[in-house]
Image (tube, rainbow, N blue to C red):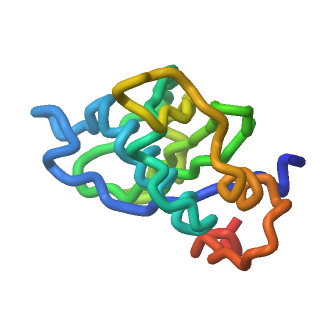
Amino acid sequence: MSAEDRPYGVHRTRVEWIDTDAAGIYHNTTVVRFAEAAEAELMRAYDIPGYFPVAPRVRYEVEFEASIRFGEEVETRVELIRLGRSSMTFGFEVWRGASDGRARRRAAKGSYVTVHVPDKEAGGSAPWPAAWRAALDGTGTADRAEPDARAAH
């Protein structure tokens, strides 16, 4: 899978008061929620039903680069970097929108890994379903919905 063909999802939102600390600056855990919302967009676009209950995160890494404040617009992009037998590696970027004379700027970047665990009682990983692999690696024949922002990038 080449970089330009990688599946991705985009989530746009505004930082709400609940996303901030008492000073009105986004809380570091908000980045996880933004990334998961973009990941949900990716899974919807590629018609991967039932993904989240069977795909726990096993590794997460974030670099914080700039603050985002209450009320500012945010765009988060998640990209599938690697599709393994039973794991997926995602990369993401969170961008603060331009406002009040400040330029658009990347606020955070990072990566995380999910693992397919279909049986919570037994535990352990298992291969991703064949239909999911086909949809994500481009070998599937089903049409998929394009993420709204694909044309914008």
Q: Specify whether residue 135 is in view.
A: yes
Q: Position of residue 82 (x, y in %)?
A: 74, 36
Q: Residue at x 72, y 33 (%)?
A: 85
Q: Quadrant of residue 138?
A: bottom right
Q: Which residue appears farthest toward the front when viewing the image? A: 122
Q: Position of residue 15 (x, y in %)?
A: 28, 52
Residue 45 versus residue 60 in the image, above or below: below
Q: Residue at x 32, y 29 (%)?
A: 28
Observer-nearest residue: 123 or 45? 123
- Please give the count of numbered marks on the rendered protein: 0
Is 94 placed left or right of 18 in the picture?
A: right
Is 21 placed left or right of 117 in the picture?
A: left
Q: Residue at x 45, y 41 (%)?
A: 54
Is 67 placed left or right of 153 in the picture?
A: left
Observer-nearest residue: 36 or 13? 36
Q: Position of residue 84 (x, y in %)?
A: 73, 33
Q: Position of residue 143 (x, y in %)?
A: 72, 79
Q: Specify whether residue 97 is in view.
A: no
Q: Quadrant of the C terminus?
A: bottom right
Q: Which residue appears farthest toward the right when viewing the image? A: 2
Q: Residue at x 47, y 38 (%)?
A: 118
Observer-nearest residue: 47 or 41? 47
Residue 29 versus residue 37 in the image, above or below: above
